[in-house]
Image (tube, rainbow, N blue to C red):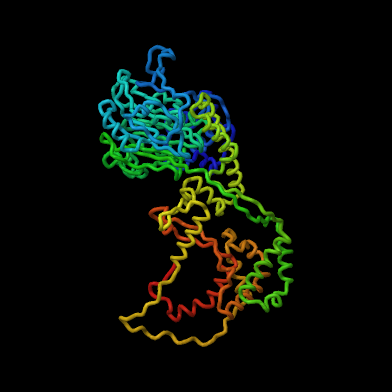
Amino acid sequence: MKGVANFLSPTPSESQARATPCEAAAPAVRPPSSQRSRAHRGHRSLAAVAYRRVLWMSRLDSRTRENSSGACSAGETTEPVHDDSRRFSSHDLEEDVPSDAIPRVMPPKGATIDTSFPSPASPAAREPRHLGLDACSFTFLLANVQGIFSKSAEVAHLVDRCNHPQIVGFTETFLDPSKPFSLQGYVQIARLDRRTGETQGGIILFARLGFENSIVHVGDSKTHERSWFVVHTDRGAVLLALWYRRPAKGEVESIEDLYDELSEFAGNTIHTIVMGDMNVHEASWLRFSDGTSEEGRALHTLSHVTGLEEKVGAPTRGDNLLDLVLSDIAGDLKCAVKSGVSDHEAVVGSVSFGLPLEHTVERELFDYKSAPWQAINTDLRERDWDSELSNLGTDDAASHVTRAIMDTLRKHVRHKKSKVRVSTHPWLNDRCREAIDKRIAARGTASETVARDECAQVLHEEYLKHVERTKKKLGKLSSSSKQWWKPSNSLQGRGKSGHGVQPLQRDDGTWARTAEDKAELLSETFLSKSTLPAESINDFSALPPGPAPAPDTFLSVRTRDVQRQLNKLKEDSATGPDEVATQVLKKCSGSLARPLALVIRQMLAEGRWPACWRFHHIVPLYKKKAKSDPKNYRGVHLTSQISKAVERVVGRLFLPKLQAAGVFGSKQFAY
């Protein structure tokens, strides 16, 4: 996402801030001197990349904070022009063209939403229809066709083979103003031919019928074959670029200008996708490359500075990866290589943000930062634990100690019960939902464009508020703590991908869709994996005699050993079902060592583990293969922190004797 580096990079001074979107932006990212630096020649020194990254984030920060009404803003764009031939623009016409000379294809009023894609031969395929977005997802196709006019049948078949993506972009179209081109079932959004008049190069982008009001053409590069678009989704606006870079060795100007264009057209967008035939080689980055070129190093540097990652990861022309998809969308963008219509393979991508999911969890929250630990320890030490636990069994003794700890905490520590909303889209609040509902309700009406742009503006504003909240939260944490790294990795796409546990299929073919049904099914699955097989008699070989029964020995459980294990617990470890935090056990280890030692002695006397410590919170962890199969998940247990300390105390008593007796087999091992 576009705010990742914003969270993790220092904020430059105001003197480094860039101009507003409506002003002539000075090239802050590009060094002012005519002599290019080592970083501009492709040498990625850490200092140069870090400096450019700070300047880049300064530029984004200044632009995103300004709610300008400039023409480059994603929320203020005009209706896209769709024509049957070439897009008219000032750079390729010697005289002005009247606006009524530009043909437009507008959607019919009152069009209904239909999720099925019509056959290209049907009359409905020629009528724009409002499909909108499925949740927050769309698909796109990128293909180098090397002559789209002469390969129109092959191009149509390619689009059909790729299941009619919502967005289709072609490079090396070889078109000129005298050659109109249309794609059945699609509306042309923008077309940019070679400016020199050659019938080479060129790009063109189409939107599937009904999707054309969700994508807006916002401008072109002034000198390069690169067009910019904004794709409106219910998660926020996405900046999209279609680019053809001719294979010119040492040409890095088109890459350097990309810094300015990214900043110019970003507007209210929160994600970026740059796709096209870029004709660069960088073996250490792209892997599938013929060595490393200057332009490849320059594009690699740009990806570092702007936070864009390459998503294709497979050769697209021979053994080389030339058709790239660069994006800051983490795990929600997937790309695959398909057979193309030229010597280049096609790239099919899908962006699936998933449905905004949230659930409310009720928790008891304690303010441990201001807790009076001395008073808590005094209260726990003054209890007569020997008399309280003398007549209790193992289960009752363990439960009594846990209740006593929690009652003492509630007595001395400020606490409250709070309902916490957990969401996969933290910035999608009630204001965002209202704007999305208005946008959906306006489909097919005259106010659709206004509602779309207002929705993009609201989503962008709430996203910026989320950015600021996250920056403040990370700024208060230590960079070595788990609480800092977890959101940081998530923002950089290194965390878990996906959106929780998807619906699971039972053995009888039915589906578990609700949280309760999925939890019950996973519980049954994990329980079946933990069942021991039935005993069988060995009829093939004589078993050696078992070890002789060990004589009764005294097992000493000392208070200082219990206190030592309590102090070894990690404070950032998750709290178990008993809700006793590790911080409490560590700060009160001297006061709790005695009662826990008494519980352990009672456990050893009865030979059983307390029932309250056998309850675990189990988190399903996906392993491989189909995510709909519950057998492909492994349960990770979050146990009681008291139980962890007691396990280690008991383990020190038994493990040395078991290992000395050789009771573990040669193939019995763990982590």
**Count the marks: how many?**
0
State left or right for residue 619 relative to residue 310: right
Position above or below: 559 against 162: below
* Image-quadrant location for residue 287: top left
Front position in the image: 523 or 248 = 523
Residue 25 visible within the image: no
Front position in the image: 105 or 658 = 105
State left or right for residue 550 relative to residue 624: right
The image position of residue 113, as x and y in percent, is: 45, 32
Position above or below: 224 against 4: above
The image position of residue 290, as x and y in percent, is: 29, 41
The image position of residue 623, as x and y in percent, is: 42, 57
Residue 618 visible within the image: yes
The residue under the point 29% across, 21% down is 198
The residue under the point 28% across, 23% down is 199
Front position in the image: 126 or 424 = 126
* Image-quadrant location for residue 408: bottom right
Query: Which quadrant holds the C terminus?
Result: bottom left
The image position of residue 491, as x and y in percent, is: 51, 45
